[in-house]
Amino acid sequence: MLGAHPEVFAPAEPHLLTPLAHLGYHERVERAPYDPFVTQEALRELVRQLPRGEADYLEAMRAFTDGLYGKLLAASGRRLLVDKTPAYALVLDFVARLYPRARYVVLTRHPFAIWSSFVESFFDGDPEVAHAHNPLLERYVPAIGRFLRERPVPLVTLRYEALVQEPEAALAPVCAHLGIAFDPRMVRYGESEGAAPAARGLGDPVTVARETRPTTAFLGTWPQTLAARPAGLTVARRILESLLDEDLAAFGTTRADLERELAAAAGTPARPSPRLPRTRHALERRLLVALRRNIQQNAFGRLVRRVRFLCDVLLR
């Protein structure tokens, strides 16, 4: 929607800042193709020797990202650039240090609606495989919740539910925050002649491309979707147990509300997942889910991974 504004360029999610955060100084990468322990110690020693310490290090990182962002923006002919990579939520401390004067827009949604969408879009509706591969809510809700409470940078919050129901009203404070005038083409993002076409990234490839404007079709569907699988609500309850009340409050809900909704969902008629068309993505997704499920159930595979990890540690 922001990319449909004539002054804003929104390329596909570049995932540019996350690896910079995990070079070793601010964050750690345990599965990097280099020794993260040695890298971290070396970088910290390097930063200690810089005249201005961390400030010089961040300035160098910013010069790199500014160069790439600047070339993208210049080629687009627009005034603002949006980087909407979701994984930045997991390195927000670094991002806020790197760009303290950027304008941040924090989009939140009902936690279990996020989870349901994630499971359906990328794991063929299998919540156990999805959770084993990526405990999404346990990672993102605390990180974003703390960011919203501490507010280390200028930001505006936006609720998905409000955005799809009343997009004009929801976008007004966002436009004011960004210093741009509201443009109706933002709501008709898929049909505006004057706007750049939406960039395809690594996000949801199933439903996003089918829509040309905000839709309320997915509001309130998560209880039926989770109830369609035997483990759906069980995994959801397990997730809720690990989340803190203050983080849930930052997302606009409470533990009591979510517990009540889960209890009601248990008696809700299941809503079977729609059958995907036989596209390349659908076939690849089903294959990946089958492989992940097999790995989870394979005790020998877990043993092999554990031995490899121990050997890796000993060789260091």
Image (spheres, rainbow, N blue to C red):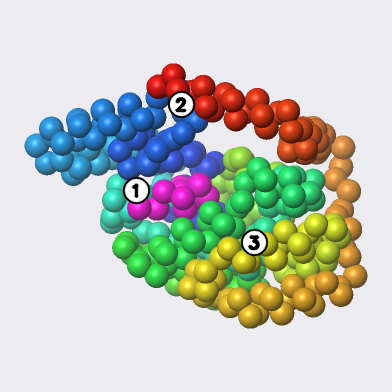
Q: Nearer the viewer, mark 2 or mark 3?
A: 2
Circle 3 sits on which residue?
239
Circle 1 sits on which residue?
94
Q: Determine the CA span between mark 2 and mark 3.
A: 31 Å
Q: Nearer the viewer, mark 1 or mark 2?
A: 2
- Residue 134: give x, y in percent of width and height: 62, 46
Q: Amino acid at mark 2?
A: Val
Q: Quick one: 48 or 6, which is closer to the camera?
A: 48
In the image, farthest residue toward the left: 51
Q: Which image quarter: residue 110?
A: bottom right
Question: Mark 3 packing: few (<14 Cα in 10 Å), some, or many (20+)?
Answer: some
- Residue 302: give x, y in percent of width and height: 67, 32
Q: Which image quarter: residue 12?
A: top right
Secondary element at tag 2: helix
Asked if residue 243 lies in the magenta stretch, the reply is no
The structure residue drawn at horizontal position 18% and vertical position 44%, both measured from the top left corner, is 55
Secondary element at tag 1: helix
Question: Mark 2 packing: few (<14 Cα in 10 Å), some, or many (20+)?
Answer: few
Q: Quick one: 215 or 310, which is closer to the camera?
A: 310
Q: Is residue 147 visible?
A: yes
Circle 2 sits on which residue?
313
Q: Which residues are magenta?
A: 83-94
Q: Amino acid at mark 1?
A: Phe
Task: Decide: is 289 above or below 268.
Answer: above
